[in-house]
Image: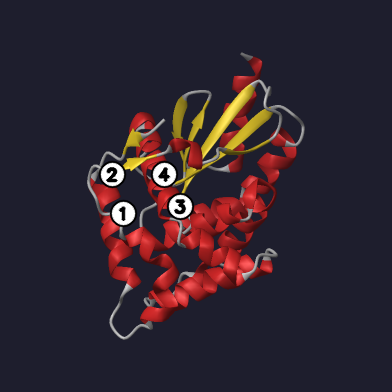
Amino acid sequence: MLNKLIPTALGLAVVAGAAWYLAPAGSNQTALSPLVGVAEAQTADAEFDPSLVQEMSLGDADAPVTMIEYASFTCPHCANYHSNVFPTLKAEYVDTGMVRYVAREVYFDAYGLWAGMVARCGGEDRYFGIVDILYETQRSWAASNDGGEVAENLRRIGRQAGMSNDQINACLDDRDTALAMMGTYQENAERDNIRSTPSFMIDGELYSNMSLPEFREILDAKLEE
């Protein structure tokens, strides 16, 4: 089933940003060629196939509580959450079968979209490991204003995860998946009223970022309902 890619101001900014980052002044255009498909996603009413975007989750599918994280790979607050809060939540609630954890990507910029494409390139088995690397090394791979340099940084992360350059380039050149990722992100974000990252839907209720004790309090209350 094909859905329409409904442009939002944020979504159009991401796509426009992708086009800009694909050819910044002084960059090596050849090095960026595998990413051209993303820039072509500027059509305002483009169709996309939502089946191309797999929902990435951890934990028991039948867990009593579902927690959905909305995060951007270029968001420093998201990186901080993944370093200092998520490992404990995972150990205490996800690994014990009490919470099903769903990761949904937010694309505030082109770099975040490219990172999502690389993370998904490894498939479900590698996805969360690549996500960990992306957040742990965010300050280094996303620091440049040169799109070519960022693209090579992301390829390096992909290779670290066991993929070849050909595999990574094929993923980055997949225009249909890029469109589906953008469209799915926009539909999810509009439906759940996501305006900042990280944000969390816990059993259908929206929460902003918070401390580990606050997460525990909310999750424990949900588990008692």
Provide the residue designation for mark 4.
180
Q: Which residue is situated farthest in the bottom direction here? A: 26
Report how far apart the C-alphas of labels 1 and 3 lie in the structure.
19 Å
Provide the residue designation for mark 2.
46
Report how far apart the C-alphas of labels 3 and 2 lie in the structure.
23 Å
**Helix, strand or loop status at disc 4:** helix
Report how far apart the C-alphas of labels 2 and 4 lie in the structure.
10 Å
* Mark 1: amino acid: Ala
Q: How crowded is mark 1: few (under 14 residues within 10 Å), some or many (20 or more)?
A: many
Q: Residues within 10 Å of mark 4 (few under 14, many from 20)?
A: many
In the rendered image, residue 86, in percent from the top left (x then y), is placed at: 63, 46
Report how far apart the C-alphas of labels 1 and 2 lie in the structure.
7 Å
First of labels 3, 2 by sequence position: 2
Of tags 3 and 4, the one toward the viewer is: 4
Of tags 1 and 3, the one toward the viewer is: 1
In the rendered image, residue 186, in percent from the top left (x then y), is placed at: 35, 40
**Helix, strand or loop status at disc 1:** loop
Report how far apart the C-alphas of labels 4 and 1 lie in the structure.
10 Å
Provide the residue designation for mark 3.
72
Seen at 33% across and 70% down, the residue is: 21
